[in-house]
Amino acid sequence: MSVVAPFPRPRDRRPIATFDRRELTRILDLYGRMVAAGHWRDYAIRLNGDHAVFAAFRRTAERPEIRIEKRPQLRLKQGAFALVSEHGQVLKRGNDLGSVLAPVERRLMRLVGD
């Protein structure tokens, strides 16, 4: 006889950290402007149980130039969002995505202004 596995109940499932629509729109807007400036060429999104990561690459085969991480469990301590450099150094951390993305947006203004 066959064994029927029951569907997991909603309360048994672990929540997955994700970017909401507003956050993803803001990140993809920045990504599009960096692509138009010729600085980035590829991106990747990773969603885990405890964090979500958006990585932007100069070339596909390299390490990501920047990573935007969202860790909801840190929202009351250090801030849910972090901007991480290519070498793993945390450049900016906070609860407001706009302030975390500010260093990248300032660099974009210099790229376009040159």
Image: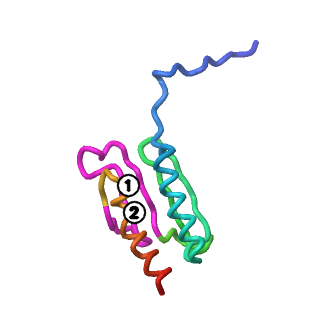
Give the spatial CA distance, label 1 vs label 2. Answer: 6 Å
Give the residues in magenta.
66-92
Q: Residue at x 57, y 65 (%)?
A: 32
Q: Are marks 1 and 2 in contact (CB under 8 Å)?
A: yes
* Rendered image: mark on residue 97: 1
- Helix, strand or loop at mark 2: helix
Q: Position of residue 94 (x, y in %)?
A: 30, 55
Residue sticking out furthest to the top:
1
Q: Residue at x 42, y 69 (%)?
A: 105
Q: Position of residue 36 (x, y in %)?
A: 60, 72
> In the image, is residue 96 above or below residue 20?
below
The kind of residue tagged 1 is Leu
Left or right? Give the position of 79 relative to 21: left
The kind of residue tagged 2 is Leu
Given residues 17 and 61, the one toward you in this image is 17
Q: Residue at x 74, y 15 (%)?
A: 2
* Rendered image: mark on residue 31: none
Residue sticking out furthest to the bottom:
114
Q: Residue at x 47, y 38 (%)?
A: 16
> In the image, is residue 36 above or below residue 7?
below
Q: Position of residue 17 (x, y in %)?
A: 45, 42
Q: Residues within 10 Å of mark 2 (few under 14, many from 20)?
A: many
Given residues 21 and 85, the one toward you in this image is 21
Residue sticking out furthest to the right:
1
* Rendered image: mark on residue 101: 2
